[in-house]
Every structure is written in C-alpha cells, then in structure tokens.
Amino acid sequence: MKLGEGVEAAIHCVATLASVEGNSTMPGAALAESFGLSPSYLLKHLNMLTAARILESLPGPAGGYRLTRAAERITLLDIVLAIEGREPAFRCGEIRRNGPVKLDASAYVKPCGINAAMLRAERAYRAALAEVKVSDIVAEYAAEGDPRSIAASCAFVARHQRPQKSGSQNPKQT
Amino acid sequence: MKLGEGVEAAIHCVATLASVEGNSTMPGAALAESFGLSPSYLLKHLNMLTAARILESLPGPAGGYRLTRAAERITLLDIVLAIEGREPAFRCGEIRRNGPVKLDASAYVKPCGINAAMLRAERAYRAALAEVKVSDIVAEYAAEGDPRSIAASCAFVARHQRPQKSGSQNPKQT
DNA sequence: GTAGTGTTACTCGGATAAATATTGTCCGAGTGACATCGG
DNA sequence: CCGATGTCACTCGGACAATATTTATCCGAGTAACACTAC
C-alpha cells in the first residue's frame, strides 16, 4: 500500500496546466522546474497522462503539454489510475485453492469473501477520488491559498505558457 | 498503488486461526501448507502480525500462533496496517515549495489541498476496511461457502491445532 | 515587399542504467515435550 | 510406581540473497519557427 511519488507530481502538473489560458501549452521542462523535479523523469509521467488522454502533447518549438478537456471533467481518480494503473491494488491470488487437499473447481464458484471485502474498500477509495475534480483543487487554491504563492504561480505560468494558433480552439470547453 | 501479496496470506491465516478452538495454537508451517505458501516467508508476515499484537506466538513443541483477542475485535484494517505499515499511502513531498521562487515558510502554513484530498480518500478506504471484522469473514464463509471446502478446512484445522494447558485461558473472550 | 526554402533549435518519446522495495531462503536461539534413569 | 533430569525435536526469530518494481538519466526522431535567398 504505497503510492508512487509520481502521483503527486502528476496532480500538481495537471493543476498547473489547468491554469494556462485557452489552448496554450506549457513545456514539460517548465513544469519540472516549477516543482524542482528531474525533467527527464517527469516526462515519463506526463507521457502516461498523455496515453490516458488526460493531456495532449505538441512537438516542436512553442510546443508542450495541455489538457485535453476542461478541468471540471478531470478527477483525481483519472490521474491516479493513469499513473498507478487501472487494476485494483489487491489482487486475489486464490491461495485458498492451493492447500494440500485438492478440491474440484466447482467448490470455488463463490467468490472469495476476503477479496470481495478488499475490493469493496477499494471502490470506496476510488469513489472518494472520483468526487474531487481538478477544478476543485484549483478553485480552493485560488480562494484560500497564500497570496504570495498564488502570485508566484500565476507569474510562472504566464512566463512559460506558449500560445497556439492551431489545434483544438477551446480544449477546455465542457 | 499496489498491495503486497502478503496481505492476502495474512488475512487468510488470521481467518484460519479464528477457527481454532479455545487457546489452542497452530504452527506457522501448517498455515503455510494450508495455502501452499513458502513457510519461511510466511513467518515473516506472521511475525509482523505478532508485532502488531494481533497474534501471539508460543515457542517449543506444540507451540505455534493464536489470536490475542476475539475475532470480533480484529478488523481487516488492523491486518492491512500491520503488514503494509501505518503511514498513509500518499505522502505529500511538499513539492509545491521546490519551485524556482523561494517563498517564506509562512506562505505554506495552509496544508496542500491535494494532500488533503488524497488523505480523505484514504480515510474512506480505511473506514471501509475497519467495518469488516474477521468474524464476519469467517461467518460468511461458514454460511455460504461450499460444503466440501468447509469440511476440508475444518478437518485441516482439527488435525493441526495444538491444545495448550497454560497461557491465556480465554484469549477469544470479548 | 513577398514567397519559397534550408537551417536550426526546441519539443516529446522511448531505450537504457541505478536505486530501492519486495519477495524468498537459510540458519541459529530458545523452549517445552519426551524418554531415561534413579529412588 | 513416581519423580527428577538430560536429551532432543520442534517452534519462532532474525540475518542473508534474488527478484521485481520504481526511480532516474541519456540520446534520438520529429516538428514548427526562424533566417536567408530569390523573385
């Protein structure tokens, strides 16, 4: 039960990208600098977010990353699943069958109660994550964050975002 | 987001130990055989359960493991925390502070919203696990499990449990 | 001045190592049961 | 026959490798902007 460190970075990056205007992009190097992370390694996670259709990437100069849809339509669950994988954390190995007494397979048609309980707990976990939208994170930060921190963040985004002429004109539209 | 394989083994072992009578014990080797696991490695997990005061171990011949308290007072959360550790899966590295612009520490007195959301989800996860008692698992299995499987399990427990003369006379009492 | 073209610098992406956590195995310390021996 | 005692086999516990996963780094493919040249 340990989440990779990349999850934190991924969420912060998505939240930052939610603050860029219109269809502008932001390079991965800028995101890495924004959080003091290794650029090369952050790209790996950004790439996973791209594969999960949360981000899209534009190559070339003035290229970078941007959201594929509005921040209201991205939940923390989307990000966690993109980074950590979609399969549940608890995988039942059906060790109940591995005892010395070999029974017919028909004795195990009922699902393992332990597995059921663990998966139920994980559904609760995912449901809680699915309720939090990236827009909520951004809004709460804008409303209650420290003014100095907000100013620094906005300045950083404004300095590093790259406007785009083509592409999806309103990628953030609901 | 991946739980160790040992969690499954640990829960099965605790459920099995909940079926032994009175203050009897069951050797770790028998538990390992019961699920087709490596005895040496299972001991590692049983040892963690012992350190968490869920099991207690008796050395010597006729020794083994038994529960320290009634199965009604042991939850799946207790077991998961004993194996996977008590610290939360998501650890906020405070990467928001690592940007190029160094702000005063007073700008970060408010907790990170992302961290808060992740911990909230994890609380939901743990709450769901805390609601499931080992006695529930055992009772459901006894009520709805396959008769052949139940018979095999009971026979196995009866064959391998070792009655104790001394020690806590009623360790399962509430 | 404008259009076409070649260069260039910047981007992401995947392949490649290092570090760490997990999984698996082994041997040793300790203890109670058992057989033996003496009364 | 009963009790004390020494041996022994069985238990758990911690120290020691092998493997898998995560983390970190590097270099290459691709692309659009930019500068230059020709018209």
Image: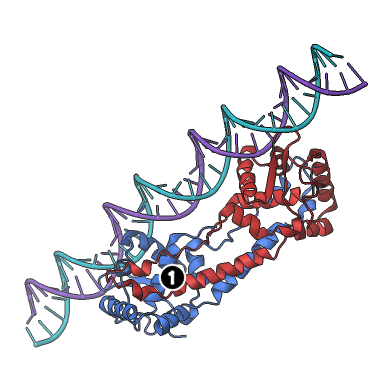
Chain colours: A red, B blue, C purple, D cyan
Residue at 44% over, 85% down? B173
Q: Is residue A4 above or below residue B142?
A: above
Please name the amino acid that badge 1 sits on: Ile
- Place of residue A105 in the rendered image (x, y in percent of width and height, measured from the top left): 34, 71
- Place of residue B33 in the rendered image (x, y in percent of width and height, measured from the top left): 29, 67
**Mark 1 nearby-residue class (10 Å; few <14, some 14–19, many ≥20):** many
Q: Mark 1 — on which chain does it sit?
A: B
- Place of residue A42 in the rendered image (x, y in percent of width and height, measured from the top left): 63, 42
- Place of residue D10 in the rendered image (x, y in percent of width and height, measured from the top left): 23, 68
Q: Is residue A5 above or below residue D31?
A: below
Horizontal side, residue B72 vs residue B125: left or right: left
Residue at 78% over, 58% down? A174
Q: Is residue B114 above or below residue D30?
A: below
Taking depth in this image into account, of A122 and C7 the one nearest to the observer is C7
- Give the SS element for disc 1: helix
Residue at 79% over, 39% down? A160
- Which image quarter: residue B99? top right
Horizontal side, residue A58 vs residue B84: left or right: right
Taking depth in this image into account, of D37 and D35 the one nearest to the observer is D37
Residue B86 visible at all: yes
Taking depth in this image into account, of B48 and A22 the one nearest to the observer is A22
| Residue holding disc 1 | B11
Question: Which quarter of the rendered picture does the N terminus of chain B lie within?
Answer: bottom right
Instruction: Give the total of numbered labels.
Output: 1
Horizontal side, residue B92 vs residue B75: left or right: right
Horizontal side, residue B151 vs residue B82: left or right: left
Residue at 65% over, 52% down? A8
